Amino acid sequence: MKYGFTTGSCAAAASGAAAYMLLTGKTKTDITVETPSGRIFKAAILDIKRSENSVSCAVRKTAGDDPDITDGALIYSEVSIRESGFSIDGGKGVGRVTRPGLDQPVGAAAINRVPREMIEKKVSEVCSFTGYSGGLKIIISVPEGERLAEKTFNPKLGIAGGISILGTSGIVEPMSERAFIETIRLELKQKRAEGERRAVISPGNYGREFMKKSYGFDLDRSVKCGNFIGLTVDMAKEEGFGELLLVGHIGKLIKVAGGIMNTHSREADCRMEILASLALLCGADGGTARSILRCALTDEAVEILDEAGIKQAVMDMAVERICGNLERRTEKMKIECMIFSNKFGELGKSREAEKWFIS
């Protein structure tokens, strides 16, 4: 299947081309960007516009064989001179953060950290090549962004006015469910063939820095299960693993505490209902439970639990239920679990989870 490139890669490519044209006065019709995955993105440069102090151009988003709603959208970058340093902001069609707990702070454009780094890296390369030592102002815009955002979770998450500029690897992997599940099984088979008796699974690389810093563990070594937590545990048992550690963000794993084994939002989204129920079991009053139910993000809910003095009790109960639900599903396969959040770091872990990282 054909892979595509993220909005972050497109923004970096457009920014590099606009900076080059601004600083040299020449026209650039294509540009290459090295993505964090190592793949090279060669982008055609479209709709070039020049003014006295700025240059604007666009790159067309391509999602490959992934059903991405931004496929075909034009990602624009306008670059202009400033006295020093680089500033990166969003223009028309790029959302703005209105609630805490996301990748960027409240008030900032919804251009995530890795895309910002990619933009700055590419523009820095252009400055070095041209010998320019001053500053540049970079504005990313997506004319269709506000309309496209209506088909995403941005409004619910508190991102207003457009889409987010995203991507951690710079590429878009095709998301054929069957192919993805077969890949999970193949990876489990390989690890079992190499003599592994214990499997570490995680929904993705979200939390990679947390795991490296806290436990010296690279999540690339885990089996990525995406939303298919239940199926992955089933396959691990079928392949002969005796023990399993599930590591992930509370936004995904809290669903498993409620018995939800496919954590995609189209299947179920009872995060706040589960957290509110656990809070009540740990002694919360009705007002606390209602506050949790009004949350859009799990980090918000965890903050309420923390203020109520029951965060750890709720997290311990959540971990216990996650392990219990998975052990019942696999008929007593030994399950350990570790959950974390963006704001609070480690939230909870089962009794023997930490032993997995002690050599």
Image: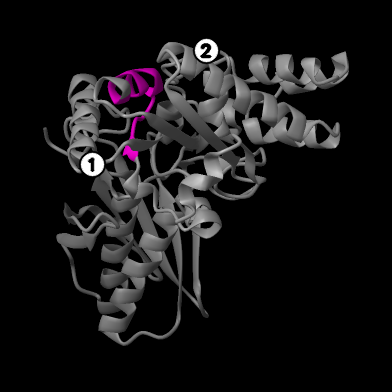
Q: Decide whether residue 157 is among the magenta residues.
A: no
Residue 243, above or below 358: above
Q: Secondary structure at mark 1?
A: loop
Which contiguous range is marked in magenta? 223-236
Look at the image and say whether residue 234 sits in the magenta stretch.
Answer: yes
| Residue, disc 2 | 259
Which residue is pictured at 12% across the width and 36% down the height?
Answer: 2
Q: At which x and y percent is residue 344?
A: 67, 45
As helix, strand or loop, the secondary structure at mark 2 comes to loop
Tell me if residue 235 can be seen: yes
Residue drawn at x 31%, y 82% is 128
Q: Residues within 10 Å of mark 1 (few under 14, many from 20)?
A: few
* Residue in front for this viewpoint, 129 or 103: 103
To which quarter of the image does residue 193 belong?
top left
Give the residue type that dot 2 points to: Gly
Furthest residue toward left:
1
Is residue 175 left or right of 269 when viewed as pictured? left
The residue identified by callout 1 is: 195
What is the number of the mark on residue 222? none
Identify which residue is drawn at 72% across, 14% down: 277
Q: Could you say where residue 349 lies in the image, as x and y percent from the top left?
A: 60, 37
Assess whether mark 1 and mark 2 are in contact (beta carbons under 8 angstroms): no
Give x and y (percent) for residue 320: 62, 24
